[in-house]
Amino acid sequence: MTFNRRQFVQMLILATPAIGSFPKFAYAQTPTGPYSLPPLPYAYDALEPYIDRETMQFHHDKHHQAYVNNLNSALKKYPNLHDQSIEQLILNLDKLPADIRTTVRNNGGGDLNHTMFWQIMSPTGKREPSGQLARAIEAKFGSFDEFKNAFTQAGLKVFGSGWVWLVLDKSANLDIMTTANQDSPLLSGFYPIMGNDVWEHAYYLKYRNLRAEYLKQWWNVVNWDEVSRRYLQAKKAS
Ligand code: MN3
């Protein structure tokens, strides 16, 4: 399994001549550099009572902004990389100048992950998946509740800072995975359909040390229309 996934990523990278055209698998095109902080698609307090205004302000304006700033500052001396999307940078990490690899992994990952995170939450909308995504989740996990439970348990088990994900593999199969720090699932050949941030900065002001409660309440703000859109596009590209 691991070998196959590695091979797959290698294939993606080899198929990307000198950081050229973007691999088909990772369809999503974020803007090229220098990068900027995307505006939050709703008000800071829109996700209350589940995620509070202060957390959103700090998380978006301070934490996410810092990832963007660090990424731009690392790329400053490499103008030849400024036409790259963040997905391209992440998928081509091994080809980047050695002195910026870790910064791009952490801060490019941070920017990419958070840009998705704001979009896959919303104050309104359906609170469970429908259509093809709902059927795929049921086929893989048994039921939506079993999926939620498995995702929540995986999120609880992340030691330290990281993310829990629903991903799509190269054969268009869904799976749950976790990553440390700001690592994107793209690094290991999976496409992130949705992810929850389990860094303490995502929940500590409101939930303190109770990550389980945060993970449970987070289901109240998932934007299933956007998650479905990501699933269908990735599935088409896989
Ligand atoms: Mn975060």
Image (spheres, rainbow, N blue to C red):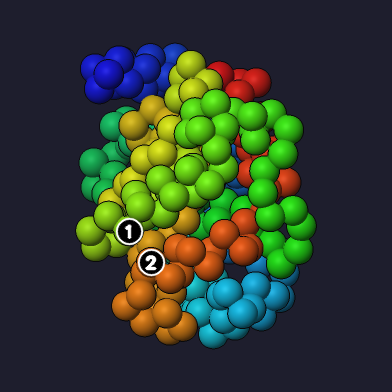
Name the kind of residue labelled 2 in the image: Ala
Q: Which of the two residues, 142 or 214, is positioned nearer the viewer here?
A: 142
> Quarter of the image containing the N terminus?
top left
Name the kind of residue labelled 1 in the image: Leu
Q: x, y percentage for residue 225?
A: 72, 46
**Camera sees residue 96:** yes
Q: Is residue 110 above or below residue 55?
A: above
Q: x, y percentage for residue 95?
A: 32, 30
Q: Which of the two residues, 176 or 233, is positioned nearer the viewer here?
A: 176
Tell me the SS state at disc 2.
Answer: helix
Q: x, y percentage for residue 108?
A: 42, 51
> On residue 96, which mark appears?
none
> On residue 156, which mark appears?
1
Q: Is residue 155 above or below residue 186?
A: below
Residue at numbered disc 2:
212
Q: Is residue 32 above or below residue 114?
A: above
Tell me the SS state at disc 1.
Answer: helix
Q: What residue is at 29 percent from the left and 39 percent from the top?
A: 97
Question: Residue 67's image quarter?
Answer: bottom left
Q: What residue is at 42 percent from the left and 19 percent from the top?
A: 12
Question: In the shown orientation, is residue 216 left or right of residue 44?
Answer: left
Q: Are marks 2 and 1 in contact (CB under 8 Å)?
A: yes
Q: What residue is at 36 percent from the left and 75 percent from the top?
A: 210
Query: In whole angstroms, how far apart are the C-alphas of marks 2 and 1?
Result: 6 Å
